[in-house]
């Protein structure tokens, strides 16, 4: 081990002892020493492309102070970009230009999901975070993900990360086997817009959920937009940890129903609900109308979401019809 390596290890340790924000530990570890000239008192660091601003703003002053405390010399620090490709760059799926808001078919089955997606695309990180859309196959969930991404590309700058949960799990396993889990997480944490499709796949996979929780916490803290899709309401997916379901609840959970299901709601009187008495009647009709457990569950969830907006006390109504 060289003298400069020993000095740098002491500098990093001193800096870490001064850190109050936990996230800065990670940034300190990613500041790779390229060279240290003890005669000209110059240190060159390397960070992967896109991280230089964060390093300059938060870490360089800390390292400058640490260098002085360790060496009693005033060093000048500079950053050298690392543009090399990492093995996780291929993790991200391409965005399909064909899927936009302009060609998304809006009907009374998906109008809420469309409105939520458009709000997120116009003002990422400000509207609903995360935005969660659930519903059966064929209700436009994936189309909305691509539409959001295409809108963000047209109007905002930043890195978009889009993948499905199955690919996420496979790449996570590869990262774990090769001892590169930290690199894997860092690649996803660089997202300004993070989107994941088909999260039902994560049910029962404790490791994948813990990693995703870590990513969600990081992105949420930095006000980076997240969008997730499911086939079922995340709160009804057996095998999802309470901690991750709570994080989905930080934002908005919207159902994208099939056209037939919404027609069933209208036929059962749900669409006409205006007060508690009408809601009780609609619920009774709803239970009579469908003998399909999945359809009934979806319709009931949609009814509950609608009535949250009108402050109808569901507990009181349920008590009357039980």
Image: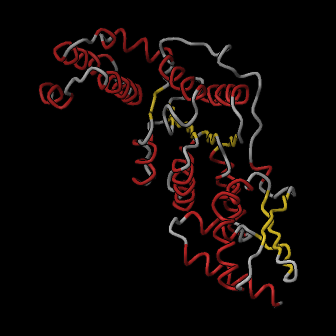
Image point (50%, 35%), residue name: 132
Image point (63%, 69%), residue name: 62
Percent across and percent down for residue 227 are 57, 37
Q: How is the image coloured?
A: secondary structure
Tell me how many marks there are: 0
Is residue 88 shown above or below 193? below
Percent across and percent down for residue 114 are 54, 21
Image point (25%, 15%), residue name: 282
Image point (50%, 29%), residue name: 135
Quarter of the picture holding the N terminus? bottom right
Is residue 44 shown above or below 276? below
Front residue (pair 226, 224): 224
Front residue (pair 230, 287): 230
Percent across and percent down for residue 206 are 51, 60
Percent across and percent down for residue 51 are 73, 55
Quarter of the picture holding the C terminus? top left
Which residue ends up furthest to the left in the rendered image? 320
Is residue 53 shown above or below 79? above
Front residue (pair 64, 243): 64
């Amino acid at each position: 081990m060289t003298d400069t390596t020993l000095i740098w290890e002491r500098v990093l340790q001193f800096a870490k002892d001064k850190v109050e924000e936990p996230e800065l530990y990670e940034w300190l570890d990613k500041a790779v020493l390229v060279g240290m000239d003890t005669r000209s008192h110059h240190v060159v660091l390397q960070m992967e492309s896109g991280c230089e601003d964060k390093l300059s703003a938060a870490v360089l002053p800390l390292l400058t102070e640490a260098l002085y405390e360790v060496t009693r010399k005033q060093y000048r620090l500079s950053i050298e970009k690392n543009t090399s490709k990492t093995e996780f760059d291929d993790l991200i799926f391409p965005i399909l230009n064909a899927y936009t808001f302009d060609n998304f078919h809006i009907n009374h089955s998906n109008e809420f999901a469309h409105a939520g997606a458009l709000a997120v695309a116009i003002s990422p990180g400000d509207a609903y975070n995360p935005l969660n859309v659930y519903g059966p196959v064929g209700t436009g969930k994936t189309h909305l993900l691509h539409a959001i991404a295409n809108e963000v590309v047209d109007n905002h700058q930043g890195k978009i990360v889009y993948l499905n949960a199955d690919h996420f799990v496979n790449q996570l396993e590869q990262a774990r086997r090769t001892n590169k889990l930290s690199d894997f997480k860092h690649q996803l944490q660089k997202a300004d817009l993070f989107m994941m499709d088909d999260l039902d796949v994560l049910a029962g996979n404790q490791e994948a959920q813990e990693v995703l929780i870590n990513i969600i916490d990081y992105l949420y803290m930095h006000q980076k937009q997240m969008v997730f899709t499911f086939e079922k309401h995340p709160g009804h997916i057996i095998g999802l940890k309470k901690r991750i379901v709570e994080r989905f609840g930080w934002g908005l959970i919207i159902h994208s129903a099939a056209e037939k299901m919404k027609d069933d709601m209208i036929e059962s009187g749900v669409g006409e609900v205006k007060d508690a008495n009408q809601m009780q009647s609609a619920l009774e009709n709803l239970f009579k109308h469908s003998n399909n457990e999945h359809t009934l569950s979806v319709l009931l969830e949609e009814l509950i979401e609608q009535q949250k907006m009108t402050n109808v006390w569901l507990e009181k109504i349920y008590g009357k019809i039980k």
